[in-house]
Amino acid sequence: MVKHKYLYICTNYTLIMEINRLIKTQIISDLKHLNKVVLLYGPRQAGKTTISKHIIQEISLKTLMINADQSKYIDVLSSRDLGKLRSLVAGYELLFIDEGQRIPEIGINLKILHDELPELKILVTGSSSFLLSGRVSESLSGRKKIYTLLPVSMQELAGIYNRFELNDQLEERLIFGSYPEIINTMSHSEKEEYLRDISSSFIFKDILELEMIKYPLKIRDLLKLLAYQVGSQVSIHELGNKLGLNRDTVERYLFLLEQSFVIFKLPAFSHNPRKEISKSQKYYFYDTGIRNILIDNMKYLHDRNDSGALWENFIIAERRKYLIYNQKNANCYFWRTYSGTEIDYVEEIMEEYYAYEIKSGKSKTRIPISWSGEYGSNFQIISKVNYLEFIL
């Protein structure tokens, strides 16, 4: 199986094709036409280095490729010395820095390069946005363009497969997720082994190495609790009690996991706090394979009792990818009244509200009167019949 130069995938149809990541064309355009530093964030193993190499190949500029693990480059790129920086990039048209968050004072040095060598194109990847963006946001104010690369989306797979094939692969995506290596791995055991490896090492590496974490094992315990509570409201107080941690520590760990692209938060929507829950949140996983391996449940759907929650996580995560990759601005929520009426997913777009109930089965649901009377009648059930229209 080919695993270099391009990202290929193999399926039961014995096809071998390249996955075209949706943000690639826009990044190429920005590097060619904008005088900005391009920052590419995302979780480890999502394909940042691979897409960057594709971009470098297609943009056809003389490129200096730097792995931030190499100390000889770290010394120069953290020096604030224009002479050293100029000497490093002399004769190159594009500077590519992989895993830039490992370089001290990366932000100010990128600012120096951008301001003093405006003809130099710069592309930087980073696996933890809270590390890299914290160092570059202020220094590169007005000088940067940010992109996020997540595990492969169904919209990206739709560039290869027709809808019949996407539906045929749906259970695989629900159980094993969509990391590029997972899509590129054939057997059940190989997929499971990869997920165990990534869930026990890669997704925690930056947090544990570069943040002062007092109780590192508690982070994994916290993720397991969240995995069991997908689709349900999460109580910070309850999490703290179960983990033996105070509220501030739990909130900090949740923030770190969000910023490292493991989980994301869906807050409660409310314009009427007397009737509607307003101070609550749900958490979902960017990748359902990671969620499943954390609770050690890699069974197929007919043997699971959490298929509804798994379906909800998958749909909301895929919708999130769709919004990010297509640069669509929407505020996203869930909605619930104190009497128990709820809607799984709500988008607010330009002061218009769109409500969605996510169903894995064939049960019918009507729009709640308490919602329609207050916020309008934009309501849709998302099921296995129409989900592709929602996420493509």
Image: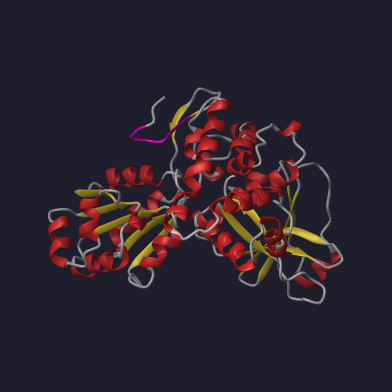
- Would you say the magenta stretch is mainly helix, strand or loop? loop
Locate residue 95: give its quadrant.
Answer: bottom left
Please say if 60 is above or below 342: above
Which residue sits at x=30%, y=65%? 105
Residue 330 in view, yes or no: no
Q: Please state the horizontal and vertical placement of residue 201, each as a whole percent of the image.
A: 48, 43
Camera-side residue of 148 and 378: 148
Number of numbered tags placed on the structure image: 0
Residue 101 visible: yes
Q: Which residues are magenta?
A: 4-9
The image position of residue 150, as x and y in percent, is 49, 49
Q: Residue at x 21, y 67 (%)?
A: 80
Q: State the image quarter where residue 176 is shown.
A: top right
Determine if the magenta segment contains residue 223: no
From the viewer's perspective, tell me whether residue 349 is left or right of residue 242: left
| Residue at the (47%, 61%) spot, across then down | 212
